[in-house]
Image (cartoon, rainbow, N blue to C red):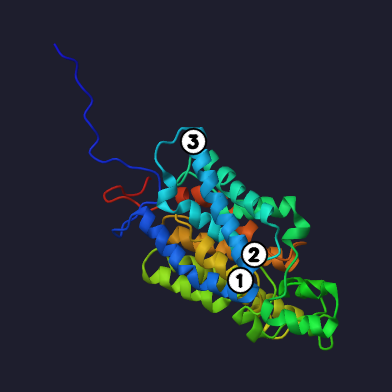
Amino acid sequence: MEPIKEPKPLVLVSSSPHMHCGLTISKSMREVILALVPAVLASVYYFRVDAVRVIVCCVLSAIIFEKLANKVMGVKKDTVKDGSAALTGLLLALCLPASLPSYMAVLGGMFAVVIGKAIFGGLGKNIFNPAHIGRAILLASFPQQMTTWVIPATKAAAVTAATAGADATTAATPLAVMRMTEKVWQAGGAAASQLPPLSDLFMGNVGGSLGETCVPALVLGGLYLIWKKLIDWRIPVFYLATVAVLTGIYGAVMGYPSTFPLYHLFAGGLMIGAFFMATDWVTSPITKKGKIIYAIGLGVLTSLIRLRGSYTEGVCYSILMMNMVTPMIDRFVRNVSFGGGQKK
């Protein structure tokens, strides 16, 4: 009598991301890279050859270390072809300052791919956003280089001519200026004159990371992803709205002008974080309610770190912290299957 054989499964479920719109993973990665093109062009316009250098170093490093990690771990599939490594490197580059030395950018690509993704088993198994893992490790390892901001090329010539000093090529970011003193928003405050006009902040004509400056470029790319149904609108909308509300309340209590929340919305990594980092398919919740809770949590943490923390920027660490609780959100806020009902 022949032994009974186990039936083959009718459906094979692989690791996320699970695409439900007819897109393959490689095509969806290409779409996200395409959405980042406006931000890349803006970074090259403002920071010129340094922007190209940092981007090339990060992308090539991510691709090379993805291949090496696959070889060490015995992964036969060439995951470089799906574009996830290139996208990770590009996102990391857009979170770095233009003045960062090339070898640090290469190390960042290695950290993002190896520590942020490969050690968890590869794409779909990582619990943290790989690009922000790379940025967080670089910030902890090289704090001075990671917080040195180059004045955009559109302003550098005028500033250098006015000051005729070697230090004229660098400056504090708007968020750093706002944190210099609690009186920055008071009439006649010493640091108030150092804040850039909102128009410069909106267009990206200020010091900062490559992709954390030009708001229209980032919003355009984010709207494209929403239109293509590659990201859920709830995450960026509720994230940005939470930051706007909390900073608005704080500013009203402290007696700051009504423009206070606009500075927080336009400055730092909030826009790229809201549209491109927090919406990562693997590390964000899968349900609609879960996404809203996740986004509000991001807004609360970002506001707390920016307003009361010792560090001026809170987007990176807020996303990494909310990544940790994403499985818990999915566990307690999940859709009830048809006919499943509620446990009594």
Which corner quadrant holds the C terminus? top left
Of all residues, the one furthest to the top in this rendering is 1
Q: Earlier in the sequence, mark 2 or mark 1?
A: 1
Tag 3: amino acid: Lys
The first of marks 1 and 3 along the sequence is 3
Cβ atoms under marks 2 and 1 closer than 8 Å: yes
Mark-to-mark CA distance, 3 and 2 = 38 Å
How far apart, in angstroms, are the residues tagged by discs 2 and 1?
7 Å
Amino acid type at mark 1: Val
Camera-nearest label, 3 or 2: 3
Q: Is residue 288 left or right of residue 129?
A: left
Q: Amino acid at mark 2?
A: Thr
Q: Residue at x 48, y 38 (%)?
A: 70
Query: Can you see residue 171?
Result: no
Taking the spot 65% from the left edge, 78% from the top edge, the residue there is 261
Q: Regarding mark 3 in the picture, which secondary structure is present there?
A: helix
Task: Relative to 59, say whether 276 is above or below.
Answer: below
Residue at image point 51% right, 45% down: 66
Residue 247 seen in this snapshot: yes
Whole-angstrom CA distance, mark 1 to mark 3, is 43 Å
- Category of crowding for the residue at label 1, using alpha-carbon neighbours closer than 10 angstroms: few (below 14), some (14–19), many (at least 20): many
Is there CB contact under 8 Å for labels 1 and 3? no
Disc 2 element: helix
Circle 1: element type: helix
**Residue reaching furthest to the left:** 1
Q: Residues within 10 Å of mark 2 (few under 14, many from 20)?
A: many
Q: Position of residue 276 (x, y in %)?
A: 51, 64
On residue 71, the disc is: 3
Residue at numbered disc 2: 302
Residue 212, horizontal then vertical, whole percent: 61, 70
Q: Quadrant of residue 231?
A: bottom left
Residue 300 falls left or right of residue 276: right
